[in-house]
Amino acid sequence: MKSAKIRLAALFCVILGAGIWLSSCGGGGGGGTSSTPTGSVGLFMTDDASTYKNVIAVVNSVSFLNSGNGDSCTVFPAAGNTSPATVNLSNLSDVMALISTGNCPAESFNRIKVVFSNSVGLTDSTGASSQCAFTSFSQGQPAPDTLSCSGNNCTMEINGAVNVLASQDSRAALDFVLKDFDVTGFGTSSCSVSMRVSPLDAAQMDQKTGYISGVSGTVSSAVGNTVTINTGTRSFIVNSLASGQTGFPGLMQFTKTGGFPAIANCASFDFAAGTCLANQVLTTVTGTVSNLNTNSAPYTFTLTPSSGSPITVSVPAAQVTGTLADGKLATVKLSSQTASSTFAASQVDGLAGMGAMGTPMNNGMPGGGMPMM
């Protein structure tokens, strides 16, 4: 079977600051002792649009390494949490979502180590699924490197400078360039995936404009303009400015009741306190389209999730990507509740290549461990 290209970019984004006690970091060379200055670490994830509607991977751990003195610092999972992160990368389009926070010694690390399951689940634009295996990776070199795999897990080490500065902020990123991933044998028992991975420095990260940077997860509490979002490793109290978000409390109650993912665009974080001041909080819902009206502005349609009641959605034509069609799937980002069961969307992705839903695609959270993002 010919290779298919996944047109998706997934980004593990690491924000480094000062004074967070949430996760301890061990070091082979004595790093992380009580007398060593430390910096805070927040671990984020993101991606871009893809021809594959689901790209589900399991990340076990992410660590920084200093090959000179042997020091290491694990930034995911956080201390006291051994659960891996099950991530639907296609559900994080243009979002850098916080998944973990930690503490690292103030020193320079030159390698990044990622441990993940060698199995990745793919769903193409027709709805066909395939369970595939990661087989190799490249940092942009002509020939891919071989992963180190044992049992069900693979380990990848990549060159990348991460400078943790005491009492200062610094940033680093690990970019899984899935648009350059090769998939061979989709739909067969021998399906394999070769991936490309590149580190990004702060300047390169700043070029990723238009991304929402914040907290993604399920809503466990919603009172007024304050919501609690559980990322899977911890909960964040999100204080929303709710500017321009009509019916915000109702939208968040709908999000909580339905178990839909919420994405908070955080203007500022306090990792230690577990708080976020958000410019906007969006709700992501995937469902089947009916009663589509594109003859007037804004577009309107009925969206029926796999579980729960139908809702009415309105969206400006300019905010629609892909193709909307009755009887086909669409993923919406809801920004306001304008009336009972009626919502305004800031973005709609029409998935006309896929039929009506039988089971949740991107809405649900798997039982146990980290939520599927």
Image: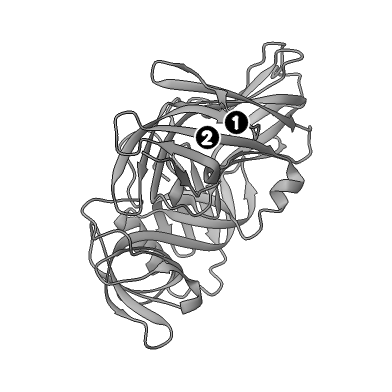
Q: For residue 2, which quarter of the picture?
A: top left
* Residue depicted at x 49% and y 72%: 319
Which residue position is annotated with label 1?
Answer: 138
Residue 94 place in picture, x, y as percent: 55, 55
Above or below, 319 against 98 in this view is below
Residue at image coords 72%, 52%: 206
* Residue situated in front as seen by the camera: 238 or 351: 351
Residue nearest the viewer, comparing 113 with 49: 49
- Pinpoint residue 66: horizontal percent, then vertical percent: 72, 19
Q: Is residue 167 above or below residue 358?
A: above
- Residue 53 coordinates in the image, percent (x, y): 38, 51
Residue 195: which disc? Answer: 2
Q: Residue 140 at what x, y percent from top left?
A: 65, 35
How dense is the environment of label 2, judged by Cα within 10 Å: few (below 14), some, or many (20 and up)? many
Whichever of callouts 1 and 2 sits on the residue coming sooner in the sequence is: 1
- Residue 161 numbered mark, or none: none
Label 1 crowd (10 A; few <14 / some 14-19 / many >=20): many
Residue at 47% over, 45% down: 5
Q: Type of residue at label 1?
A: Ser
Residue sitting at the far left: 358
